Image (spheres, rainbow, N blue to C red):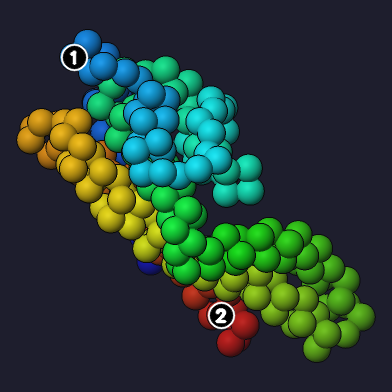
Amino acid sequence: MLIVMSVLILLAIVLLPNLWVQHVLRKHSKVRKDFPGDGADMARHLIARHGIDGVVVESTELGDHYDASKRAVRLTQDKFAGRSLTAVVVAAHEVGHALQHHRQEPMFLTRGRLAVFSAWVQRLAPVALLATPLLAFVNPAVSRWSILIALGAMLISTLVHLVTLPVELDASFGKALPMLQQGEYLDARDMAKARTILRAAAFTYVAGSLMSLLNVWRWLRFLRR
């Protein structure tokens, strides 16, 4: 019964935040004829207004994000060409990351370096796990080193999640909301809805961090046996 409850809790942590954020984004994705432009227009306007040089706005199929290496704000087509509250708010959030990069904010730069390092380490983890049974057969003591390598990769991934959380929160509530408010692009009712959109999106990062911590805890328990 305890195992079943644990599995259900894990599934809830993984699935419910994503379902909620998708619901919130869809809810506010209706076309707004009173908006003068789409998500791409908003992104370009904010980039110009805040003097963020060299950043372009592009359409993508890989999810909304800011690519620091290419200095590009990338929006999925529904946000890029969408004239909706969701499109405008998501565009402002991604420009928030561009502003973090433009200002060379330490947390943003640290997250970027950790993400690159984590990507390399993640390549070692599957190899280490696959080698564990063979090493256990040859020398059980050595096999624990391969598990430690895999655990190290998970720890670094968890660290990336933990550093990402404040970066995302700042892009939303320290950058996007003030930009939208100061520019008076939205009325009071839409600003309240914008907070809901950003809060829902932020919760997915909280859930990701919790899931990452649970994975590390599970492996630590295994190693203590």
The residue under the point 31% across, 51% down is 175
Amino acid type, callout 2: Leu
In percent of width and height, residue 35 lies at 23, 18
- Which numbered marker is on residue 145? none
Depicted 144 relative to depicted 5: above or below:
below
Location of residue 105 (image quadrant): bottom left
The residue under the point 31% across, 18% down is 37
Q: CA distance from mark 2 to mark 1?
A: 54 Å
Quarter of the image that includes the C terminus: bottom right
In percent of width and height, residue 93 lies at 36, 43
Disc 1 element: loop
Q: Residues within 10 Å of mark 2 (few under 14, many from 20)?
A: few
What residue is disc 1 on? Answer: 34
Q: Can residue 3 be seen from the camera position used here? A: no
| Residue situated in front as seen by the camera: 215 or 88 | 88
Q: Can residue 49 be seen from the camera position used here? A: yes
What residue is disc 2 on? Answer: 220
Q: Residue furthest top?
A: 33
The residue under the point 49% across, 54% down is 101
Depicted 179 relative to depicted 146: above or below:
above
Depicted 127 relative to depicted 189: above or below:
below
Amino acid type, callout 1: Asp
The residue under the point 87% across, 76% down is 135
Q: Is residue 124 left or right of residue 154?
A: right
Disc 2 element: helix
Q: Residue furthest left?
A: 188
